[in-house]
């Protein structure tokens, strides 16, 4: 029986369904069935029989009253269609219709304070509402410049999320007008008003550097800026770090442990805690000079900030001081490195490079060529790219630089719509389908260009044969005319000549029996081919 027993907030227009395990005597069932209010009133219903009289849907003649308990009863007198089977007992189901419109709750609660991440408020209603009477109808004071409404209705809940930019430490008053209504025309009746206060601006102490890892050039003084607000002092310290340590690939671990050893530099700078304006203070880490090339752990704290805020304020930074910039590309099979001088931007040759796995193992050495380029042979320990680090020369010397493929600078390919994969590189592939020419009966010429080493699975299908014919060949083995062959190491082959090499000479490419053109297709790589294709092993 639906609604099931003890179901709450049932819409007054919900179909009421009774399902039997066999065809029933419809007149007997209707006589044995009743829908009764808690006060005793009996609702008038119409019966809609379905599924060979195994299912009956009760449709109330009038919309059921709201906020009312009903009991659906099918008495034991109901019998099967052939009259040979009956029920051992009465079956009942009690349910309650949705209440009249009311506000159940708000977030924040009336008189509450938002958390610092809040961007608006929400209102939950006691029953489903008419969206048109709700959206853009709330009155907010002070009025935001831009407001977005998001309505969520799930099963028996109905909530409205109102989003806008909150002014810090400001009291807001929200009025839900009494005209908001449910789908049946019942209104809230009177305005519902609540107030809340937005969170104050949190204390801020953050380095004006890329998040968690940054590089400074030896061409400039080793100075850093600190952004601050609502704090009384800035406590800055600097520690030496080995050129390769766990922090290089995992800078976030600075937030999880205390620094090791004595600081190379430490200072405390008093600032005005009462100003709501953002302050910027410059700290000279080398007394106006330049720190030696190397890797450092730069830390910042203030009395008013809490520990959790270090995860979103930039207070612990892995700082690289270098005269060389490295760009590292990690691939299955190799790692490529490009080195340039930070002062001139020119490629740097003759640098001694060391390649490290993420676990810290040194696995290769190389020297940059005249173009500042170097290549390492490389296979990841697992079947995905887990990250590598490359270091040039030694800390304290010229030509020092560090780069890790795990450093993103908060800029990743997916942010610009480019998908990436850290697993083994997938072979490139392409499909080309060429219909036969209507007069010649031959495949319309098309071409594919690929590396001479690229395996090509060529396949063809003729109208006279339902199956695909396929063969694996390489571009270098194709016979193409000199005029069609590029001057590079890549080769081309026309679809018609490929088809000729695969299709029997007795097969005519165009027939009057064909409902679709004969098709030649070929691909490079391992993309799925039609299931009827015979694949070559390669």
Image (cartoon, rainbow, N blue to C red):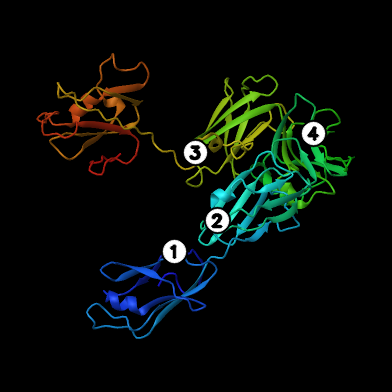
Specify which label sits upstream in the sequence, 4 or 1.
Answer: 1
Q: Residue furthest left?
A: 506
Judging depth in this view, the residue of 533 and 259 nearest the camera is: 533
The residue beneath circle 3 is 420
Asked if marks 4 and 1 touch (Cβ < 8 Å), the reply is: no
The residue beneath circle 2 is 129
- The mark found on residue 14 in the picture is 1
Side (left or right) of 538 relative to 224:
left
**Under tag 2, what secondary structure?**
loop
Q: Does residue 198 show up?
A: no
Distance Cα–Cα, label 2 vs label 1: 15 Å
Task: Say which quarter of the image contains residue 190.
Answer: bottom right
Residue 286: x and y in percent read: 83, 32
**Under tag 4, what secondary structure?**
strand
Task: Say which quarter of the image contains residue 468.
Answer: top left
Specify which label sits upstream in the sequence, 1 or 3.
Answer: 1
The residue beneath circle 4 is 225
Q: Residues within 10 Å of mark 2 (few under 14, many from 20)?
A: many
Q: Nearer the viewer, mark 2 or mark 4?
A: 2
Q: Residues within 10 Å of mark 4 (few under 14, many from 20)?
A: some
Distance Cα–Cα, label 2 vs label 4: 52 Å
**Under tag 1, what secondary structure?**
loop
Residue 223: x and y in percent read: 80, 31
Specify which label sits upstream in the sequence, 2 or 4.
Answer: 2
């Amino acid at each position: 029986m639906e609604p099931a027993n003890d179901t709450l907030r049932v819409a007054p227009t919900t179909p009421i369904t009774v399902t039997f395990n066999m065809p029933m005597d419809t007149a007997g069932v209707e006589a044995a069935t009743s829908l009764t209010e808690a006060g005793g009133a009996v609702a008038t219903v119409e019966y809609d029989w379905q599924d060979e009289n195994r299912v009956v849907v009760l449709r109330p003649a009038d919309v059921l009253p709201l906020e009312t308990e009903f009991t659906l009863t099918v008495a034991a007198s109901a019998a099967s269609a052939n009259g040979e089977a009956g029920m051992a007992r009465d079956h009942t189901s009690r349910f309650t219709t949705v209440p009249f419109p009311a506000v159940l709750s708000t977030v924040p609660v009336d008189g509450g304070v938002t958390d610092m991440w809040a961007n608006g408020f929400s209102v939950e209603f006691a029953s489903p509402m008419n969206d048109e009477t709700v959206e853009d109808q709330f009155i907010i004071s002070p009025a935001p410049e831009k407001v977005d409404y998001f309505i969520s209705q799930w099963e028996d809940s109905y909530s409205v999320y109102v989003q806008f930019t909150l002014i810090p430490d400001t009291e807001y008053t929200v009025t839900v007008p009494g005209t908001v209504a449910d789908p049946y025309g019942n209104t809230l009746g009177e305005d519902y008003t609540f107030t809340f206060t937005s969170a104050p601006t949190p204390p801020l102490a953050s380095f004006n550097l890329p998040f968690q890892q940054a590089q400074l050039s030896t061409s400039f003084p080793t100075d850093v800026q600190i952004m601050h607000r609502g704090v009384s002092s800035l406590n800055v310290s600097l520690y030496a770090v080995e050129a390769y340590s766990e922090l290089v690939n995992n800078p976030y671990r600075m937030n999880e442990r205390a620094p090791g050893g004595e600081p190379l530099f430490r200072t405390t700078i008093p600032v005005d805690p009462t100003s709501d304006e953002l302050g910027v203070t410059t700290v000279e880490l080398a007394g106006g000079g330049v720190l030696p090339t190397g890797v450092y752990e730069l830390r910042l704290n203030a009395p008013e900030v809490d520990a959790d805020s270090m995860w979103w304020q930039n207070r612990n930074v892995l700082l690289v001081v270098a005269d060389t910039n490295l760009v590292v590309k990690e691939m299955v099979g190799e790692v490529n490195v490009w080195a340039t001088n930070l002062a001139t931007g020119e490629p740097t040759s003759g640098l001694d490079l060391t390649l490290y796995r993420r676990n810290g193992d040194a696995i290769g050495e190389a020297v940059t060529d005249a173009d500042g380029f170097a290549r390492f042979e490389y296979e990841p320990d697992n079947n995905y790219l887990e990250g590598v680090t490359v270091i040039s020369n030694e800390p304290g010397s010229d030509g020092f630089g560090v780069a890790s493929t795990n450093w993103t600078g908060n800029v990743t390919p997916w942010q610009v719509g480019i998908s990436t994969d850290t697993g083994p590189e997938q072979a490139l592939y392409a499909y080309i389908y060429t219909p036969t020419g209507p007069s010649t009966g031959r495949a319309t010429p098309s071409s594919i260009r690929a590396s001479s080493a690229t395996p090509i699975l060529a396949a063809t299908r003729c109208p006279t044969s339902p199956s695909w014919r396929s063969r694996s060949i390489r571009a270098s083995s194709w016979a193409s005319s000199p005029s069609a062959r590029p001057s590079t190491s890549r080769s081309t082959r026309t679809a018609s000549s490929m088809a000729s090499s695969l299709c029997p000479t007795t097969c005519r490419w165009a027939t009057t029996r064909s409902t679709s053109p004969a098709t030649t297709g070929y691909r490079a790589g391992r993309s799925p081919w039609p299931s009827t294709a015979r694949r070559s092993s390669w």
